[in-house]
């Protein structure tokens, strides 16, 4: 089954830092089910993608500095997507995500 592009997300770290102490919401509720994800990150930090309500996030996977090529990743429509820094605060650069359905 081929994926089709469905949603994009971008976070400019100079506007919204991502720290090691709290999750930053990227999307409050995904528009559709997601089957794959592409991520570019230029912060130089290791990050963690998570889903779930604020205060009850469930960690999914790490984002290594630079990002990752398209990966299979099932996320349900309506789920909240967030990110948290692991190595140090991400305060420069950007996080860009393409979601595929």
Image (spheres, rainbow, N blue to C red):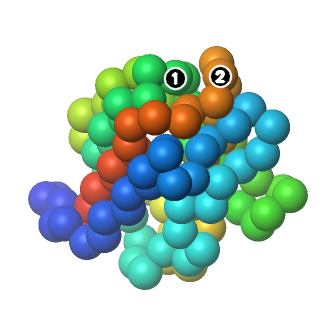
Element on which disc 1 rests: loop
Task: Name the quarter where the C terminus is drawn.
Answer: bottom left
Q: Earlier in the sequence, mark 1 or mark 2?
A: 1
Height in image: 30 above or below 21?
Answer: below
Across and down, in percent, residue 64 comes to 44, 22
Query: Is there CB contact under 8 Å for labels 1 and 2?
Result: yes
Answer left or right for 69 relative to 78.
Answer: left
- Residue 90 horizontal/vertical position (percent): 56, 33
Q: Is residue 87 left or right of residue 9?
A: right
Q: CA distance from mark 1 to mark 2?
A: 6 Å
Q: Which residue is mark 1?
A: 45
91 or 18, which is in the foreground? 91
Secondary element under disc 2, as helix, strand or loop, is: loop
Residue at 35% x, 31% y is: 42
User: Is 77 or 81 nearer to us in this picture?
Assistant: 81
Q: Nearer the viewer, residue 15 or 7?
A: 15
Q: Is residue 77 visible?
A: yes
Label 2, residues with CA under 10 Å away: few <14, some 14-19, many ≥20? some
Q: Residue at x 62, y 42 (%)?
A: 18
Which residue shows up at 41% across the image and 71% down it? 33
Label 1 packing within 10 angstroms: few (<14), some (14-19), many (20+): many
* Residue 65, above or below 101: above
Name the outermost residue toward the right: 55
Tag shown at residue 88: 2
| Residue 72 pos. (x, y %) | 34, 44
Between residue 100 and residue 92, name the one nearer to us: 92
Q: Residue at x 30, y 70 (%)?
A: 7
Residue 78 coordinates in the image, percent (x, y): 56, 78
Tell me how many marks there are. Answer: 2
In the displayed structure, 66 sits above or below 12; it is above
């Amino acid at each position: 089954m081929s994926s089709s592009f469905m949603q994009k997300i971008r976070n400019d770290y100079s506007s919204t830092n991502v720290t090691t102490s709290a999750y930053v919401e990227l999307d409050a509720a995904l528009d559709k089910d997601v089957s794959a994800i592409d991520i570019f990150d230029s912060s130089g930090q290791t990050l963690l993608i998570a889903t779930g309500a604020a205060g009850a996030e469930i960690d999914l996977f790490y984002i290594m500095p630079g990002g990752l090529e398209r990966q299979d990743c099932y996320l349900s429509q309506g789920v909240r997507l967030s990110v948290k820094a692991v190595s140090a605060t991400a305060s420069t650069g950007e996080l860009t995500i393409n979601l595929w359905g």
